[in-house]
Amino acid sequence: MKITFLGTGTSQGIPVIGSTHPVCLSTNPKDKRLRVSVLIEWKNYTYVVDCGPDFRQQMLNVKCNKLDGVIFTHEHADHTAGLDDIRPFYFKQGDIPIYAHKRVLKALKRRFDYIFETENKYAGAPGVKPIRIENKPFPLGDLQVVPINGWHYKLQVFGFRFDDFAYLTDMKTIDDAEVEKLKGVKILVVNALRETEHISHFNLKEALALIKKVNPEHAYLTHISHMMGFHDEVEQKLPKNVFLAYDNLEINLNNL
Ligand SMILES: [Zn+2]
């Protein structure tokens, strides 16, 4: 299984438009972060988790030319706003499966009404095959994916475990029973916004506490704000098995 971080930035991305914060002005490519998403590839399967406003650029960056589906964590725009750009995949492959909680599917139907249109649908609009997921394992390719339920302040969000790899984003709280489902993962990705507290995201300390509980071989932090600091400086301060993710970072789970 190969994981590619397509984006690792918080909702505005880094640099933030118009910002003169030193991290936004940094010339280090690792300090430039598109909105969060990961590409997951194994055997012949290719999926993305979330499809934010940078989706088109991300697909071009990694030269992705086939997509078996999009799995959504929640409905916020930084995770969903790029849905229209699945068009090139739709034109080649037909309806693209989208996996999401029923509340998220409802939100997508509202925002992208033309995609879900059944009568008089515009020929250039993309098509999707909505697949409702609940908090129980569901098939994806030849795997069973395990949803991990968490809370983004008061909004329910799903993280996902794909075999030895788990991906959590936009979480602030997670029940112990859900943490149990993460036991034994080799790679854990967790959102960590910045050092100071935030109402709906783990800060660095909270993310590290969760990582300690799960105890994976390696952990990567994502959904990072410019306020976290410079990539190279922050990484110096992290425990030995914890890293800051950065855009286009690839992890090959077979090589662990
Ligand atoms: Zn987000």
Image: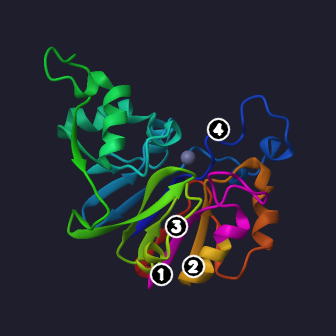
Closer to the observer: label 3 or label 2? 3
Q: Is residue 169 above or below residue 145?
A: above
Q: Main SS of the magenta segment?
A: loop
Sequence order check, earlier mark of 3 and 1: 3
- Which residue carries the number 4 mark? 12
Q: Using a 10 Å C-alpha cutoff, classify the residue at mark 1 as few (fewer than 14 neighbours), some (14 to 19) or many (20 or more).
A: some
Question: Nearer the observer, disc 3 or disc 1?
Answer: 3
Residue at image location 78% in from the left, 63% down from the top: 232
Q: Which residue is mark 2?
A: 218
Q: Amino acid at mark 2?
A: His
Q: Which residues are magenta?
A: 183-207
Q: Secondary structure at mark 3?
A: loop
Does the magenta portion include 205?
yes
Mark 3 in CB contact with mark 4 (< 8 angstroms): no
**Disc 4: residue Cβ within 8 A of ligand 1's nearest atom:** no
The residue wearing badge 1 is 186
- Image coordinates for residue 221, horizontal then vertical, percent: 62, 64
Q: CA distance from mark 4 to mark 2?
A: 27 Å
Of mark 3 and mark 2, the one earlier in the sequence is 3
Q: Quadrant of the N terminus?
A: bottom left
Q: Marks 1 and 2: in contact by CB < 8 Å?
A: yes
Rendered view: 57 above or below 218: above
Cα distance between the residues tagged 3 and 4: 24 Å
- Picture coordinates of residue 164, whole percent (x, y): 40, 78
Residue 125 or residue 110, whichever sits in front? 110
- Mark 2 crowdedness (10 Å alpha carbons): few <14, some 14-19, many ≥20: some
Number of labels in the image equals: 4
| Amino acid type, mark 3 | Ile
Q: Find residue 174 and name its label.
A: 3
